[in-house]
């Protein structure tokens, strides 16, 4: 195990003492994805690479969450591993999930009805598990170029912005209320109600100021980061490999560094 990984393990170890509940939640969202098949057929090389990358993404997000939920004097965001490019590229998404964790805490604090969740960590973990399942489904069900259009980066940005506009202007949730979205839908529905509830004016203002507005602001920052950051690309399976869409480009491009990406992922798996 190299020095970088020892630092990551040390950060995880500190979290056990700092916040055991957060540590248990992070253990769940870091659980590795099981090998997946599609219609009894093995996934393509590109799909397996993307699943491996999602595993790695959640590992980085977990370490960001520990930093964001911890007294800043105990962890330094300017030092490794947080200063690495792969960590920097995932920082704004980690901040979205951190703001969602705080939103769960706000809902637990202000809701007047009995909650289905024992703690806000339990609610948040359920939401994160849904996120993970959506990601896997998107990879497994992603159409090939011959079968349909992939979800491109520009489309994703517009989707996020439309989602936020409806929340802010119309209190409307652009998320289908199905079994596979129930935890995230309930969180947003409850948050909208608390922002416009019969609670006292002071309570409504506190909920908006401390929990709801930071959540919306974090999502806005994430959409802007996707647009401006050339290192963040929409990557999707293409035939037996991968393709990506660069900023401002609609045409899919086969990844020339696929072999390099595969080598990096295999190396990271070996080191872990």
Image (tube, rainbow, N blue to C red):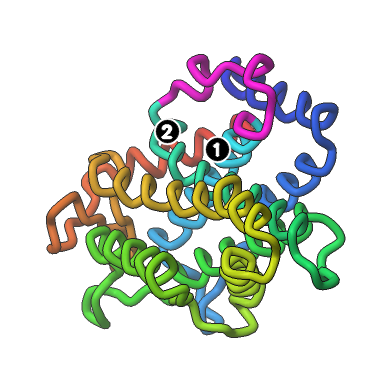
x and y percent of residue 109 in the render?
A: 77, 55
Q: Are marks 2 and 1 in contact (CB under 8 Å)?
A: yes
> Residue 8: percent from the left, percent from the top?
64, 26
- Name the image quarter holding residue 19: top right
Is 94 left, or right, of 242 in this rendering? right
Q: Residue furthest front?
A: 201
Q: Is residue 175 above or below residue 121?
A: below
| Tally of numbered tags | 2
205, 152: nearer the viewer: 205
Residue at the disc numbered 2: 86
Q: Which mark is residue 183?
A: none
Report the residue at 85% width, 71% height from top.
114
Magenta region: 67-84
Which residue is located at x 65 percent, y 48 percent?
102
Q: Which mark is residue 60?
A: 1
Instruction: Determine whether 68 is above or below 143 in the image.
Output: above
Mark 2 / mark 1, whichever is N-terminal: 1
């Amino acid at each position: 195990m190299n020095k970088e990984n020892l630092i990551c393990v040390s950060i995880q170890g500190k979290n056990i003492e700092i916040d055991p509940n957060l540590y248990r939640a992070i253990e769940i969202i870091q659980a590795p994805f099981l090998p997946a098949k599609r219609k009894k057929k093995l996934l393509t090389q590109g799909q397996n690479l993307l699943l491996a990358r999602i595993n790695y993404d959640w590992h980085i997000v977990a370490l960001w969450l520990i930093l964001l939920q911890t007294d800043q004097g105990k962890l330094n965001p300017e030092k490794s591993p947080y200063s690495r490019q792969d960590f920097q590229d995932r920082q704004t998404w980690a901040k979205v999930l951190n703001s969602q964790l705080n939103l769960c805490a706000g809902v637990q604090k202000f809701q007047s009805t009995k909650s289905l969740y024992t703690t806000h960590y339990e609610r948040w973990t359920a939401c994160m598990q849904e996120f993970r399942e959506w990601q896997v489904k998107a990879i497994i069900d992603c159409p090939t170029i011959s079968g349909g259009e992939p979800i491109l980066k520009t489309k994703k940005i517009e989707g996020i912005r439309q989602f936020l506009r409806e929340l802010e202007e119309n209190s409307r949730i652009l998320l289908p209320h199905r079994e596979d979205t129930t935890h995230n839908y309930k969180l947003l529905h409850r948050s909208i109600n608390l922002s416009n509830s019969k609670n006292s004016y002071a309570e409504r203002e506190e909920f908006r100021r401390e929990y709801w507005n930071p959540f919306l602001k974090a999502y806005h920052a994430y959409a802007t980061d996707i647009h401006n950051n050339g290192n963040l690309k929409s990557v999707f399976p293409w035939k037996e490999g991968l393709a990506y869409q660069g900023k401002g480009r609609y045409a899919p491009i086969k990844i020339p560094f696929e072999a390099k990406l595969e080598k990096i992922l295999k190396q990271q798996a070996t080191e872990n």
